[in-house]
Amino acid sequence: MLPGEGYLADTPVLRPHAGTQPDLFLRWNEMPRALAAIDVVVHLHGFSQQGGEMPLSEKVRRSGLDLSGRQRPTLALLPRGNWIRHTYYDFPALLDGGIDRLVEYGVEHFAAAIGMTGGLSIDRFMLSAHSGGGMPAVDAIVGAARPPDEVFIFDGLYGRDPRLGDPMQGLETVDRWLGERLACEPERGGALRVIYIERQTGPFSHAVGELIARHLQRAEPGLTADLARRYRGEPSGVPHGYIALICAPQLLANSGAEIDWR
């Protein structure tokens, strides 16, 4: 089956979100006809200068959901977030297992559209996020029945508003997920790549880097070099708005890639 893409409107799990329709973008790479399982990547977008009038198409290109480098059959999902006010979006419908329901809905709809009456199973799950989608991605992991195998955060770890509580809330989620994820290595490899701009998301990103370092110290020595390629934080070589566009295609092709900032 050839690569393709399309939009869905009135996605059940996203109905509580305020914003425009369509509310879900799908893209897939070339797939064999004899297909039983696919990988899924979900990307959470950031703010929009168009506020509540933002069309989802605005976020497609800079999401970096370019699957041309992937060898495995993969379905990418870009849900429209919930417009809060001004330029701000969040993703409350994806909490408490909502991200599982989104993935299941997307895969079921896709399978039906291509005539797979028996459905498709999900093999690997990847979660990426840019800007204001970063902290919602961390929160979505908490209640997920299927935690992501790979997480890519593109200048999105702003931390919490200190007026509302601990600005570093969420580190415990990353810590727990890292422990569970690394316990699956090397039989089922994963990744955590955090790309940041120092003046924007540096503090939380550095704290995540310290968590990674502590976990890798406990890894088997023979695995450390490979793990360090796939679990790390690094400063961005491009402006904020272009990070996902540049990095996501490379990381979706190879989660341990050295980013080519050109």
Image: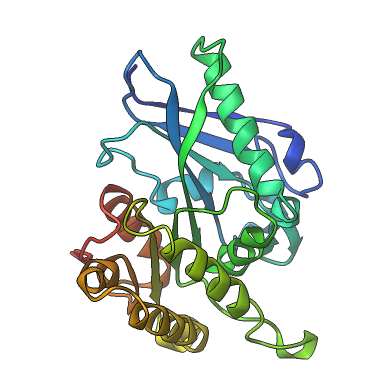
Name of the residue lying farthest toward the right: 16
x then y, percent, for residue 178: 48, 69
Looking at the image, residue 87 lies above or below residue 166? above
In the picture, measured across the screen, residue 206 lies left or right of residue 262, that is: right
x then y, percent, for residue 234: 32, 78
Looking at the image, residue 73 lies above or below residue 211? above
Please say which color scheme the image uses. Answer: rainbow
Depth order, front residue of 6/95: 95
Residue drawn at (67%, 52%) of the image: 81
x then y, percent, for residue 243: 37, 65
Looking at the image, residue 102 lies above or below residue 181? above
Residue drawn at (31%, 35%) of the image: 72
On-image quarter of the N terminus: top left
The answer to which image quadrant residue 79 occupies is: top right
Tell me, yes or no, if residue 119 can be seen here.
yes
x then y, percent, for residue 147: 56, 54
On-image quarter of the C terminus: bottom left
In the picture, measured across the screen, residue 35 lies left or right of residue 69, that is: right
Residue drawn at (36%, 31%) of the image: 73
Depth order, front residue of 233/57: 233
Tell me, yes or no, if residue 242 can be seen here.
no
Residue drawn at (50%, 89%) of the image: 203
In the picture, measured across the screen, residue 189 lies left or right of residue 88, that is: left
